[in-house]
Amino acid sequence: MEVLLNEVEARVLGALIEKEITTPDYYPLTLNGLTTACNQKSNRFPVVAFDEKTVLRAHETLRDKGLARTVSGADMRVPKYYHLFAEKFALTTSQVAALCVLMLRGPQTTGEIRGRSSRLHEFADLGEVEQTLRELGERDAGALVVQFERQPGRKEARYAHLLCGAAEPAAHEEGEGAVEAAALELRAENERIAAMEEEVAVLRDELAALRKAFEDFKSQF
């Protein structure tokens, strides 16, 4: 697989994919919403602090690569941003979900992918995750994922996406030991709650902006 994205583009694209599925009423995203999605502290590794200029530049290069678009119009207060990832690569829902988790979280085991993608796609079992990863790794147009050798102290091998070129397991290591299934499920639940709190904060910011715009409009009369 040729190098298609840099790390900033991968984070922006992953954030767009996630929010399209989890908050469809607020998608496409405003630049502020997209920046917040990139920088949120839950469901992200590593945590970043992009400014709007960095996010906008990444979106523009994604657009040049046919992976993203901007929508604007007289009836819109600000431009909004969306992705074309699934269309570009002819991916299924399960494949998009797995790649999204890998883009936002770094290398993951099959169990981690299943637990951390529940809001994106409900995998029936680990067998479906494995089948999805196998499909992504055996594409005629070029593999999109790679399986690492099992690391010392870990029960399972991890997978990584190849959208940014060859991946190294140590480059995205979260420093966690083997995790029991119950602990993983609890962590996934905590992450879902934290993600909802992040989304509520974004919605509050957008509501405040709309209220201000409305007040400014009323003041003209």
Image (cartoon, rainbow, N blue to C red):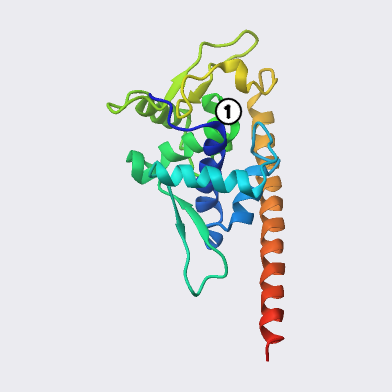
Q: Locate the N terminus by quadrant.
A: top left
Position in image of residue 136 (x %, y %): 38, 28
Residue 109: image location, x then y, percent: 55, 24
Q: Position of residue 65 (x, y in %)?
A: 40, 41
Whether residue 67 appears in this view of the structure is no
The answer to which of 43 and 168 lies nearer the viewer is: 168
**Residue at the (50%, 15%) spot, across then down:** 148
Which SS class for mark 1? Answer: loop
- Residue 127: which quarter of the image? top left
What's the residue type where badge 1 is placed? Gly
On the picture, is 52 further left or further right than 84?
A: right
For image coordinates 67% across by 46% down, the residue present is 51
Q: Residues within 10 Å of mark 1 (few under 14, many from 20)?
A: many
Does 221 appear above or below 77? below
Q: Of 95 and 162, which appears nearest the observer?
A: 162
User: Looking at this view, is 185 or 21 the one in front?
Assistant: 21
x, y percentage for residue 26? 56, 61
Q: Is residue 168 visible?
A: yes
Outermost residue, left direction?
140
Q: Residue at x 53, y 34 (%)?
A: 103
Residue bearing mark 1: 106
- Total numbered circles: 1
For image coordinates 45% across by 25% down, the residue present is 162
Does residue 199 appear left or right of residue 90 in this picture?
Answer: right
